[in-house]
Image (cartoon, grey):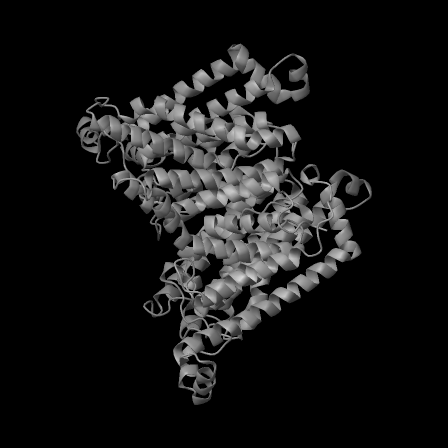
Amino acid sequence: MATNRQAATSSSPWRAPILFAVLAALFVLEGTVRNSMFSGSWNTSLAILNMGLISAITALGVNMQWGYAGLFNVGVVGFLAMGALAPVLISLPPVEGAWQAGVPRLLLALVVGLGTLAMAKLAWTRTRSGIVVTVVLIAGFVAYRWLFDPAVTAIEANNPARNGNIGGLGLPVLFSWLVGGLFAAAAAWAVGKVALGLRSDYLAIATLGIGEIIVAIMKNEDWLARGVKNITSIPRPVAQEVDLQQNPDFVDFATGWGFPAAEASGIWVKLSYMSLFLVVLLIIILLAELALKSPWGRMMRAIRDNETAAEAMGKDVTRRHLQIFILGSAVIGVAGAMMVTLDGLLAPTSYNPLRYTFLIWVMVIVGGSGNNWGAVLGSVTIWFLWIKAEVWGPALIALLTGPLPDSAFKAHLLDSAPHMRFIAMGLVLLLVLRFAPRGLLPEK
Amino acid sequence: MDFLNALVVFLNFVFIPAAAYGAQLALGALGVTLIYGILRFSNFAHGDTMAFGTATVILLTWGLQAIGITAGPLPTALIALPFGIALTALLVLGTDRAVYKFYRRQKAAPIILVMASVGVMFVMNGLTRLLIGVDEYRFDDGARFIMDVRTFREMTGLPEGLALRSTQALTLVVAVIVVVVLFWFLNRTKSGKAMRAYSDNEDLALLSGIDPERVVRLTWIIAAGLATIAGTLYGLDKSFKAFNYFQILLPIFAAAIVGGLGNPVGAIAGGFLVAFSEVAVTYPWVKVVGYLAPWYEPGGLMQLLGTEYKFAVSFVILIVVLLFRPTGLFRGKSV
């Protein structure tokens, strides 16, 4: 990284406030002006903002890994998915009959599976004999499958139309956000332990792999979260629109502001989510900024800027890298849990690496790697543009192809407008990386 | 007899598919490993380069078929292949000019190049979608089988059949030709020697008057050729879907790392190792065991892992190699 950082030029102190004000103006325009470019609906505007805030939290996690330590995580989608499991496993009500069907046996199987890996590790450190390790692994695998297979069959046979999964613990959904962070942290520990301390490319490749595997598990293990049958009705931390519309006080309040009750209830719910997300975002930024200003933060930056020198000063670089990798992934996991809560739905097929890994990367790079406010600004801006490109892209292509006569070629161009988003995002990433590697809000 | 049946089942469902898949992975991994050896970064855009190359080949194939040119019993895509390679090579050379050259001059950290390759991946992914869309296409024509199940049964009288699809045979033949030509080029020609010298020691190579930009250009052209051939063979053998080419990136990286990044022989060995493990682990062995040990009645399919987890196999191989031998089996570049 050291080679790619330009000499710190003192940027104007007004830069960040102005950019944030421009962004806010865009959202206000989206909420109020109705024309070919904006929808003029506060519901749409706030929906974009809420998802933008979740992307911002994800980007903060990535920014810790990249901006503080120079670690390239290409498995963001996997850590998001890991966090997304938490609301399902923690806050859904328990499934009737699942416990009797075989949850204890399933848990035992998982313990045996993890125990086998631990035993294999122990066997390796004690004996250094490949044969012993292989025997341990094979025995453990047989025991695991013997326990696991019947339990899964029984659980998935339990009322498969509605459940067929193990269900949750029925705890509050806000608590599950924390657990989501823990889930992602656990996955990060496993990957980081193996891939850190080697070439920097290896972490990228290993995270690419773990990302794909986590998503594959979520798609195929029906007992866990019903796989591609999706989990709906995840508990909400805020009011239901229907309840608000039936509440006479709320209807009076809405008409007082000049909104019909239906629209106002949507806006109210989205504002409630927004407040929750803002609280989480601000807490994470506060902690991150405090950490960055502490001796620990100085050490992290020292390691990032010159690993050799930091190592010579007696810093355990690999250990610090593992630490920051786990912390960053935990933040991504929290964002994953929040996203599922916002959607009220866990749909494993929607976890696409292009959308959830690489778009987040564009956000971090554009915002300014190493700067937390930059990550937030970049995320919300890029998310706004990504959503609006759906409308603006075809309009732009229609404008550009306007003079062309109607032909198959023109039809093809008009049809392929959605694909242009990927090209545009790739170009944005490449251009920022090349011409403004410090991003919109450079690191101080 | 039972032993022969078991052998036929094994050849039909494990050996032949894995050999063809291994050849495709090996060609892909060769491209990754060459780029790593010369340019010193892991190219995340390689999967999408394969997709782009295959997409151009498919479009050219359709064009050829439309004007009535076919290759008889062979797939028409073989005629289109050289043109596809040329177009892909132009694209990657352009990318190198526009993107990577700048960072090379700057001597940027490898991870910056990796990140730039992610940007390139995005753009190429979009280009491929623009060219051909996101649907699944089959573009194999010509003879479908060299040996089909019925002929084999009639020939041998065994109840189990053995099929050899022409795309599988073609994959192996083309892969052997490509590898022979590549190694001849690397070991016998002046340009190939220059490439190896540059890969071994950049400074020494510069002192001996090797033009680095020429080496880099050659590398990209060869990588584009390998990617297009690998992608086309994979598409002929299975089918073309742009997203699958993104997913094949992981087995390709695993193959290249297992063999030792930067080591061409290792890439080939790694490709076959990954392919055979993947097929062996996800194949339900119950039929083979049924012939070999008729007294044993297993409860299930004897499948170690569902096919949907096949890339977990490459991941586990990758992890084991990283844990025990990070430079790969054949001693690639240092860690």
Using the rendered image of the protein, determine whether residue B266 is visible from the camera's viewpoint: yes
Query: Which residue reaches farthest bottom?
Result: A248
Looking at the picture, how far across and down is residue B226, in whole percent?
43, 26
- Quarter of the rendering occupied by the C terminus of chain B: top right
Q: Is residue A90 above or below residue A21?
A: below
Q: Is residue B312 above or below residue A167?
A: above
- Quarter of the rendering occupied by the N terminus of chain B: top left
Q: Nearer the viewer, residue B35 or A29?
A: A29
Tell whether A318 sits left or right of B125: right
Looking at the picture, how far across and down is residue A371, in whole percent?
67, 53
Q: Is residue A218 above or below residue B278?
A: below
Q: Nearer the viewer, residue B97 or B58?
A: B97
Instruction: Count every numbered label the image shows and give the total.
Output: 0
Q: Quarter-wise, where is residue B202 in the image?
A: top right
Q: Residue at x 81, y 44 (%)?
A: A314
Query: Which residue reaches farthest right?
Result: A313
Q: Nearer the viewer, residue A342 or A149?
A: A342
Looking at the picture, how far across and down is residue A233, in whole percent?
41, 71
Q: Is residue B1 above or below residue A352?
A: above
Using the rendered image of the protein, determine whether residue A115 is visible from the camera's viewpoint: no
Q: Nearer the viewer, residue B295 or A53?
A: A53
Tell whether A153 sits left or right of A147: left
Looking at the picture, how far across and down is residue A101, in whole percent?
40, 69
Q: Quarter-wise, where is residue B289 in the image?
A: top left
Q: Residue at x 69, y 36 (%)?
A: A3
Query: Which residue reaches farthest front?
Result: A403
Q: Quarter-wise, where is residue B38 in the image?
A: top right
